[in-house]
Amino acid sequence: MNDHHEIVSSSAGVAGLYNAPTSVRMAHIAAGLKKRRAASKRLRIYGIAAICTAVGFLCILLTTIISNGYTAFQQTEIAVTIDVPADEIVDANGAIDVEKSRNYNWDGLVKRSFRKAFPEVTGMLEQRSLGELLSANAGYDLRLQIEAAGVVPTGAVTYWVKSSDDVDMLMKGRMDRSIDEKKRRINDAQLVWFDSIVADDAIRLAFNSTFFNAADSREPESAGVLGAIVGSALALIVTVVLALPLAVMAAVYLEYFAPPGRLTDFIEVNVNNLAAVPSIVFGLLGLAVFLGFFGMPRSAPLVGGMVLALMTLPTIIIATRASIRAVPTSIRDAALGLGASPMQTALDHILPLAAPGILTGTIIGIAQALGETAPLIMIGMVAFIVDVPASFTDPATALPVQIYIWSDSAERAFYERSSLAIMVLLLFLISMNLAAVMLRRKFEKKW
Amino acid sequence: MEMDAATELMPESKLKAHEVSVFYGEKQALFDVSLNINDKSVTSFIGPSGCGKSTFLRCFNRMNDVIPSCRVQGQIIMDEVNLNSPKVDPVLLRARVGMVFQKPNPFPKTVYENVAYGPRIHGLAANRQEMDFIVEDSLKKAGLWKEVSDRLNDQATGLSGGQQQRLCIARAIAVGPDVLLMDEPCSALDPIATSIIEELISDLQNRFTILIVTHSMQQAARVSKKTAYFHLGKLIEYGDTKEIFTRPQNEQTEAYISGKIG
């Protein structure tokens, strides 16, 4: 028994402290105790420092995003008194004729009405410069307002129309008036007009609803995230529908049915490897196979979802296998012992018990996919899309891609909008992770 | 224990094991075990840990199939069929040979669903009434009906350990097996729950052929008619429980039952 642990000698000289009187031994241990305590205290301090650093950076990140983005909740609007010529846009019954309305020159109407407030401005260049205070889409917005109201008012009515993004920035204090005129996007004359509008109280900051119910636009004041949100949602639906059943079936097979051997090992290793493959590679794969070989539509959420499903598959497989393994073998034995077939055992007992883990894994995988940009860029979901996608094959973009596009734009107003879009994305991610936690709490069974 | 005169004179074999060997990969866990199991009686397998008694028990319902590296050789004959043949469907076999495990392992479902699961997957009940009858009858046979009749829809995991184990017995009975395998069914239970289960086993032997693996020699002596002593994967001695405990033929058996080893 003791071949390997032969005791050489038990004399006091060799054994040292081991054979020393208790008091000596205790004194020795006590002396070392201080050092040990100090070491564990140091470790604790390092740990706290590490957490503080991480939390600090997170705070800086969130503060930056929020302080840059919160102003995008509001949009500057300018009051313009407009006398809408009813006879130009209504039909014989007095109702608005959509066809007529569409062909009417709303832009001209808005600009003309706006200029009336500044009779001193007469030169053509000056007038154009004045008109630039309003959004390039002010006419379109007015048309939508009137069509939504359903009636054309008689006489002059004051409408709030969107200002241009530069005026918006000026209003929000994000433009420095003191810098040289040539480097400023608003010239001195425009500044004077702006000040007079402010003095007249004909300008306000209103809730930027456009941001939440429109798709992308070249004009920051007309741009919104709804198109990107819908695009992301459509892509993620495809991802879940494809990835969840495939991954669960693959995981059940690998856990329960795969005959042990080289092939199974090879597949297992590669599933784990796939989880580490850079996402852009999946994008290239999608580009080559889905678009190139199968000729599927470019920029479509369908293809985006398929690429994201490929990317999410290994994550869900790994999570599912882990939660299947966490089901006690006694449950499997009980079912098999009763004569349940392996499939019945898996469907009736193992999967329901593993469901919370599978759900959590899926949601985390989907959250990852929601934040993914690179593979979507490869398959063309980076396009400039002004319509909210209505189907899986419509051209669309996704939230992170939208952020990427805006952050790349020159207009200062897109900068705050990309920050707000980041907030929207983070909100989705946080609520998905919360849902994962809550689902797990709800469905977790104790035994 | 009361001896049934007829069985003693003419013991009828329900199961015949012939040179059963079990391998885990390269390692042999069981060496050429041959024995006959009497019908409608309790047979216990005893021996120190790792002696192969549980492994042997699991041969009777092919539960060793689940372990990928496990290989079983030899024959186990029940009603002239070799259970170890690849032609025998383990699903069918397990409907005839039920099993109760070491740790009570009810499904995390209701009491009713636990008992009803076996009959349901085998399609034994045509309607709700039949299923209700099966559940009630099985729970009565397992001596649990009085305690749970008013909480059939409660979670089975809320029952006490002893109740859970009897529920597992009811669940096995509900499929209508001939043989019940019990793998140390009382090792996780307190003495009172243990004695209830032991009484139950004595009652059940009129209906079922029961094989029980136990660590407790007293239990083997109390409940079983025949006892097999295993050591290091070999069957050392097999005979009437009385004989084994009073006049063991083998030195190893004697050493074990007198507490010198194990």
Image (cartoon, coloured by chain):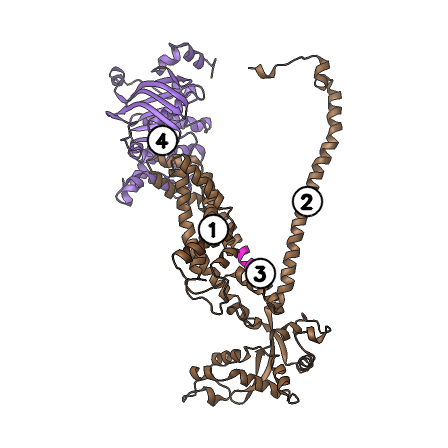
Chain colours: A brown, B purple
Q: How far apart are marks 3 and 1 (CA)?
A: 22 Å
Q: Which residue is drawn at 47% across and 50% down?
A: A312
Residue underneath mark 4 = B65
Q: Distance between the residues labelled 2 and 1?
A: 35 Å
Query: In the picture, residue A254 is in which quadrant?
Result: top left
Give the amino acid at mark 2: Ile
Crowdedness near tag 4: few (<14), some (14–19) or many (≥20) residues, C-alpha within 10 Å: some
Q: How far apart are marks 2 and 4 (CA)?
A: 51 Å
Which chain does the numbered disc 4 sit on? B
Q: In this view, does A178 lie above or below A260?
A: below
Residue underneath mark 1 = A311
Give the amino acid at mark 3: Ile
Of badges 2 and 1, nearer the viewer stands 1
Q: Can residue B106 be seen in this view?
A: no
Q: Where is residue A178 in the image (x, y as percent from the top left)?
A: 73, 73
- Part of the protein shown in magenta: A422-429
Residue underneath mark 3 = A422
Q: Is residue A3 visible?
A: yes
